[in-house]
């Protein structure tokens, strides 16, 4: 299983760009990288997923270098409502086995 | 919108009791998951199921069992609850698409306290 490591916490001011990195040194060939956001008293919610290079959607960007041993979630111009815990998930779900491993989460605090 | 519901938001049980946590999804997803979430440890997979009556152990299955008799329902069972099973339990479901993995949709969680 890929072991995933994230910073425990980060602080940012509103309007800044925030980059959260996840390290997954022993990622396997078939593993995808997925990021989730979790607010208090709620389940995690999907943000973005990628396999290599760069993926962008309306919420965030995900940068994955060529060796795929890390990935960076980029949140442009954060607001107070982006205060949450962010998890990376590395793995590949087959029909009969799961290789899914969540990181321990990064608590992002956004202030004015 | 996909909806994943869990039977209770908060549950208090006594040591040795048999505990059932129920999860229901309404999107006809093949895959369903049970995680526990603890401070500093993130989400850890207990069991998952990729089809009715099929199950696979996750990273921490000890002390737990599961049941999936219908596609939409996945139950987590604590045969004899212990205090170290006090935790937040999260259920999730996903569709098996053509890619290796697909988005998991999570329920709101059940905070279980074992006294």
Image (cartoon, rainbow, N blue to C red):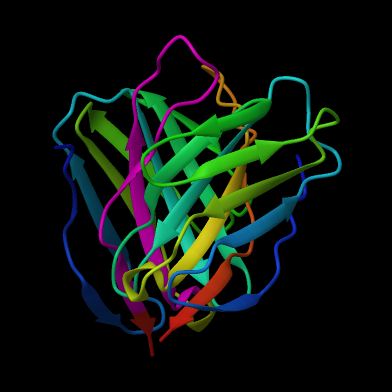
In this orientation, which residue lies closer to the viewer: A102 or B34? A102
Can you give x and y, in whole percent of width and height, for residue A89 in the image?
59, 45
Q: Quadrant of residue B94?
A: top left
Image quadrant in which the C terminus of chain A is located: bottom left
Which residue is situated farthest in the bottom direction here?
A: B115
Which residue is situated farthest in the top direction here?
A: B98
Q: Is residue B62 left or right of residue B11?
A: right
Residue occupying the point 77% across, 49% down: A3
For the magenta stretch, what is the residue range?
B85-112
Image quadrant in which the N terminus of chain A is located: top right
Q: Is residue A37 above or below residue A56?
A: below
Can you give x and y, in whole percent of width and height, for residue A38 in the image?
39, 63
Can you give x and y, in whole percent of width and height, for residue B58 in the image?
58, 43
Can you give x and y, in whole percent of width and height, for residue A51 in the image?
64, 26
Q: Is residue A10 above or below residue A91?
A: below
In this orientation, which residue lies closer to the viewer: A46 or A91? A46
Q: Is residue A90 in the magenta section?
A: no
Q: Is residue B11 in view from this perspective?
A: yes
In this orientation, which residue lies closer to the viewer: A57 or A3? A57
Residue occupying the point 39% across, 46% down: A59
Q: For the image shown, how many numbered marks are present on the structure? A: 0
Residue occupying the point 38% across, 90% down: B115
Residue occupying the point 26% across, 53% down: B107
Q: Is residue A4 left or right of residue A57?
A: right
Q: Is residue A67 left or right of residue B62?
A: right
């Amino acid at each position: 299983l890929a072991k995933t490591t994230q910073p425990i916490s980060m602080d940012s001011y509103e309007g800044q760009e925030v980059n959260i990195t996840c390290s997954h040194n022993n990622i396997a060939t078939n593993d995808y990288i997925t990021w989730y956001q979790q607010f208090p008293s709620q389940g995690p919610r999907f943000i973005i997923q990628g396999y290599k290079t760069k993926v962008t959607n309306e919420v965030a960007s995900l940068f994955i270098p060529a060796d795929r041993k890390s990935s960076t979630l980029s949140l442009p111009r954060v607001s107070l409502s982006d205060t949450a815990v962010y998890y990376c998930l590395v793995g590949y779900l087959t029909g009969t086995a799961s290789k899914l491993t969540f990181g321990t989460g990064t608590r992002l605090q956004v202030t004015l | 919108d996909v909806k994943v519901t869990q039977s209770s938001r908060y549950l208090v049980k006594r040591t040795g009791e048999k505990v059932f946590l129920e999860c229901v999804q309404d999107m006809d997803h093949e895959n369903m998951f049970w995680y526990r979430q603890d401070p500093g440890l993130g989400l850890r997979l207990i069991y998952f199921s990729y089809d009715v009556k099929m199950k696979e152990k996750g990273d921490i299955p000890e002390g737990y069992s599961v049941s999936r008799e219908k596609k939409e329902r996945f139950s987590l069972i604590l045969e004899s609850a212990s205090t170290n099973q006090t935790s937040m339990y999260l259920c999730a479901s996903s569709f098996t698409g053509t890619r290796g993995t697909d988005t998991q949709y999570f329920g709101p969680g059940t905070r279980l306290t074992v006294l």
